Amino acid sequence: MALEPIYEVEFHDSSYGFRPNRCTHHAVLRCQQMLQKRFTWIIEGDVKACFDEISHEAILGCLREKVMDNRFLALIHRLLKAGVNIDGVVHPTEKGVPQGGIVSPLLSNMVLNKLDWFTPSGSVSEHCAADMISPRPSASVDIDAVTA
C-alpha cells in the first residue's frame, strides 16, 4: 500500500488500531504498564460509527498535506464516492469509508491521528481501533475506591 509508509511514521506511538504489528492486546498491555507507573484512571471513549461517519473532506484534507499527485487524490476521491450496493441498487456515499476496504483503516487513522496528537497537557493518550484510552496520573486517588 503506497500510503502506509508515508503516514505510518507520523502516527502517534500510542496508536494501536488497525496498524502493522499492533493490536488491542498491545493496547491493554500498555494500559497495564501505565497502571504500574501509578496512573490510576483510564478513560475509554468510542468514536461512534467512525468508519460510517468520517468526513470525506477531512480524509482528503489529510491526504493533501502529504500527497501532491492529483491523479492519486482523484482516485481516492472516486473510491470514497463510489457508492454502496444494497439489494442491487447503488446508493451514493457522502461520508464514511468503504467497509472492508483495504485502505479504509489507514484513511480513518490519518484523520484520527489528529485526535491522537491533540491531548491535554500532562496526559498520555492510548488509541485503540477507534477508541481513545486516556490514562491520567494521580497518586491521590485510591484505585480500590475507583473500581469498587
Image (spheres, rainbow, N blue to C red):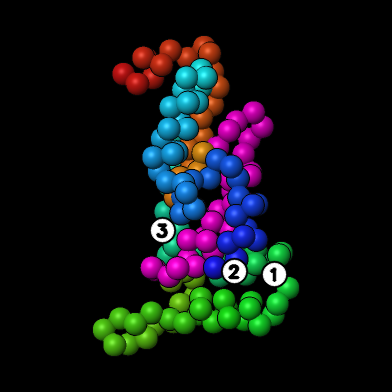
Between discs 3 and 1, the one toward the N terminus: 3
Q: Please name whichever residue, 128 or 56, is drawn nearer the observer in this view of the structure.
A: 128
SS at circle 3:
loop
In this view, 124 is above or below 65: above
Between discs 2 and 1, the one toward the N terminus: 2
Residue 55 seen in render: no
Q: Residue at x 63, y 44 (%)?
A: 117
CA gap, disc 2 and disc 3: 26 Å
Q: x and y percent of residue 128 in the render?
A: 45, 45
Q: Nearer the viewer, mark 3 or mark 1?
A: 1
CA gap, disc 3 and disc 1: 27 Å
Please name the residue that numbered disc 3 is placed on. Answer: 49
Which amino acid is tagged 3?
Ala
In the rendered structure, does residue 120 fall within the stretch colored magenta?
Answer: yes
Please name the residue that numbered disc 1 is placed on. Answer: 67
Q: Nearer the viewer, mark 2 or mark 1?
A: 2
SS at circle 1:
loop
Q: x and y percent of residue 9 in the render?
A: 64, 52
Which amino acid is tagged 2?
Ala
Q: Residue at x 58, y 61 (%)?
A: 4
In this view, 18 is above or below 98: above
Q: x and y percent of residue 7 in the render?
A: 62, 58
Magenta stretch: give its range: 99-125
Which amino acid is tagged 1?
Val
